Image (cartoon, rainbow, N blue to C red):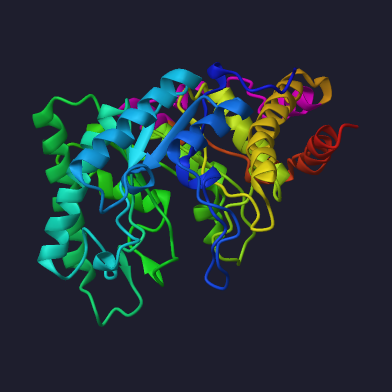
Amino acid sequence: MRYTPKPEHRFSFGLWTVGNIGRDPFGDPVRALRSPVQLVQLLAEVGAWGVNFHDNDLVPIDATPAERDRIVSDFKKALDTHGLVVPMATTNLFTHPAFRDGAFTSNDPKVRAYALQKTMRAIDLGVECGASTYVFWGGREGTETDAGKNPADAGKWFQEAINFLCEYVIDQGYDLRFALEPKPNEPRGDIYLATVGHMLAFIETLDHPQMIGVNPEVAHERMAGLNFTHAVAQAWNAGKLFHIDLNDQNLGRYDQDFRFGSHNIKQAFFLVKFLEDVGYDGSRHFDAHAYRSSDYADVKAFASGCMRTYLILKEKAEQFRQHTEIQDLLAQITADDGAMDRFKGRYSAEKAANLTAYTFDRDELGRRGQPYERLDQLVIELLLGI
C-alpha cells in the first residue's frame, strides 16, 4: 500500500500513451485500437488521477458534429463513472499531411490559418472537458534544410499564433493557461525553440507572458544531452513550470518515451526530489509508452510502473532528508559563518564600495575541497537500499 497511487499524487497519462498501438517507422501496429472510454477505464484500474488528450485522440479529425458530440458525451460520462479528471489538453498539429511543413510556422498562410482554426476548436473541446492547462508541442515546427524557411519569419509567425490564441482565450473568458513544450529534433531535423531555455526567452517576447509557461519533458532535454533537472529548476525559478512530462530516455537515441525511471534512475531520483522539495503541485504527467512487445496487460503494468517508481523515489527523497551523514555533509558543504552577509542581497553603492575594498585570500579559497565523492556514494547506496 506504500506505493499505491492516490488522487493527491496527481498522476496523469495521455490517451496517446496507454492507447499507443505499437506502430513505428518499421512496423505495423501490434495492439488493437481502444476507444477513449476503454482507456479511461484502463487508467482507473491502475489508479491514475487524470487523463489528457490531443483533440484527435478523442474526436477523429473527420468526425461530423453529431459524432463529435456523441464521443465527447460518452467520454465525459466515463470520466464521471471512474472518477478521473482532464487537467490538460493539446492539439495534434503534426499528423495530417497538411502540416508536413509545420503548422504555426508553415510557409503556407492557409496552413497557418487552418492551424489556428483547429487549435481554437481544440481549446473549446479541452475547456469543455475540464482542462485548465493547454500544451503546445511544435512537432513539425522546424526544418530539414535552412534553405526552405527563414527562421526569423518562422519566429514571427509563431509569436503571432500564440498571441492570437491568448486573445481568443481571454475573449472567451476561459480560465486557461498555456504551456509550451520544447524538443530539439524529431520528427523534423531541427525543431524551433529546442530547449526550456529557448522557450523561456520566447515567452518574454509575447503579448501575454503571464498566461504562458513551459511543459518540459525528460526525453526531450536528454535527447540534446542536457540535464533535465536543471531545466526544470530554471523553469521553476522563473515561475513558469506549468506542467511536466515524465518518461525516460537514453542519450543519442530516437525519442524513446520509456517508462519513468526505467533507465536513468539516479537522474529520476534528483528530479523527483526537486519536485517534492519545492512543493510542485501540478500534474505529474507520464508522456511515455509501453514497449512494442507489450500486450494490454503489460500496458497496465507499464502505467502502474511509472507511478510506482515515482512514489518509491519520493520515499527515497524523504530518506535523503532524514539521512544523518548526508545532511551532515550538506551542512559542511554549505557552511556559512556570516562573514559575507554584508555583501549579500540587492545592490547598493555602499555595498559595492565595501566589496571592492575587501581583501580575499585566494590561496585559502583554493585549498578548500568538497566531499562530493563521498556524498554521491551515499546517494548511490541510498538508491540501492544499503
Give the camera-side residue of 187 and 194: 187
- Determine whether, in the image, residue 111 is placed left or right of residue 1: left
x then y, percent, for residue 26: 57, 73
Above or below residue 103? Residue 371 is above
Magenta segment includes 173: no
Where residue 68 sits: x, y (%)? 26, 40
Residue 149, image quadrant? bottom left
The residue positioned 19% from the left and 26% from the top of the image is 174
Residue 73 drawn above or below residue 36: above
- Answer with left or right where residue 201 lies relative to residue 343: left
Between 199 and 337, the one nearer to me in the picture: 199
Which residue is situated farthest in the right direction here?
A: 386
Is 60 left, or right, of 236 in this rendering?
A: left
Residue 343 shown in magenta: yes
Position of residue 349 measured from the top left corner of the image (x, y, whole percent): 30, 29
In the rendered image, the quadrant that contains the C terminus is top right
**359 horizontally vs 234: left or right:** right
Q: Is residue 206 in view from this perspective?
A: no
Q: Which residues are magenta?
A: 326-354
Q: Residue at x 55, y 43 (%)?
A: 18
Q: Which image quadrant: the N terminus?
A: top right
- Identify whether 227 is placed above or below 74: below
Query: Where's residue 304, x and y in %?
Result: 66, 34
The answer to whether one can see residue 80 in this image is yes
How many callouts does the rendering have? 0
